[in-house]
Amino acid sequence: MTDTATPGRALPHPEREEIRLEGVLHALSDPMRLRIVRELAAAEAELACSRFDLPVTKSTTTHHFRVLRESGVIRQVYRGTAKMNALRRDDLDCLFPELLDILLAAADRQSVRLGDRGRSTS
Amino acid sequence: MTDTATPGRALPHPEREEIRLEGVLHALSDPMRLRIVRELAAAEAELACSRFDLPVTKSTTTHHFRVLRESGVIRQVYRGTAKMNALRRDDLDCLFPELLDILLAAADRQSVRLGDRGRSTS
DNA sequence: CGACTCGTACGATAACCCTCGTACTACGAG
DNA sequence: CTCGTAGTACGAGGGTTATCGTACGAGTCG
């Protein structure tokens, strides 16, 4: 089925049943990771790590993406030399209905409230 | 207004506008603190610290309650020798509509899913 | 007053987390 | 094959956190 992913370089993801609320909350409690998730949600598509312009080094970026993946928030897959990232909306919505949307709305709201110029209403 | 609180022993709380989403998520990402908040929500009333039967020492309990207070999740006030704890529902609902309820529902759901015997449906 | 309960303060310890830099691997283009 | 780009691995530094134990303070009750 249109397998453009590179085989033999699979990344470990938690199964849906293994995703823990505490882990998700911890993952989202870091400003950098919350920002990543918000951009991902706004894009409504897969994004390569390199598409994010974060104020940290590549190493740190890798670290944050791994935390998000290991907590079950995003799914990562290699596509050529790029690593594509997507929110695990289906899994999260199934486990914790509405949580993701409410969380994103809360983050948007806070951005507006704090005059967070740049990425408030996208 | 029926001031039963002990004066001269006020505790520092963040103002509503100072509450940060990241801080709230971080506070709730600890199992012990999530448990406290769930019990508090289920009680729908103020509860003294001593009403919680947590598997940690008193020192650690004090620590967790302080984290919850400083992140803006709960409000604490002295009443005689007891310290009463209440969720800051009004503030949280105002800042992040529905978030608290969805979060509590997610926690309940996970408890049921994991067969968390003891305090699932109260 | 004296004893008791509730909670705090402080210090210690071990674990964790965010960040970085450097060296490295994997893939694609020429 | 060589080079460039995307991302990883590893290790270290510096800060924060969760936990404890012991000693202490603040009220309440007898």
Image: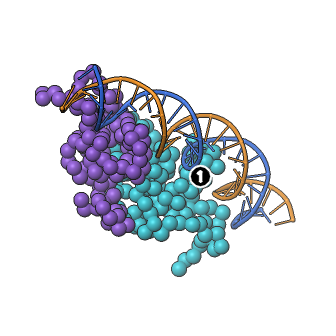
Chain colours: A cyan, B purple, C blue, D orange
Q: Residue at x 55, y 77 (%)?
A: A2
Whole-percent x, y for residue B71 in the image: 37, 38
Element assignment for label 1: helix
Q: Residue at x 32, y 64 (%)?
A: B117
Lateral position of residue B68 relative to residue A86, left or right? left
**Amino acid on which the number 1 mark rests in the picture:** His
**Vertical arrangement, residue B21 with respect to residue A94, above or below:** above
Q: Report if residue A94 is visible in the image.
A: no
Is B106 rendered above or below residue C5?
Answer: below
- Place of residue C23 in the rendered image (x, y in percent of width and height, measured from the top left): 79, 51
Q: On screen, A93 above or below B93?
A: below
Badge 1 sits on which subunit?
A
Question: Quadrant of residue D27 in the image?
Answer: top left
Q: Where does residue A21 sit, x and y in percent of width and height? A: 40, 57
Residue B48: image quadrant is top left
Residue, x 27% and y 45% (percent of image)? B51
- The number of callouts visible is 1
The answer to which quarter of the image holds residue A120 is top left
* Mark 1, residue position: A63
Neighbour tally class for label 1: few under 14, some 14-19, many 20 plus, Cα within 10 Å = few
Taking the image as shown, residue D13 lies to the left or right of residue B10, namely right
Compared to residue B1, the image places residue B51 above or below, namely below
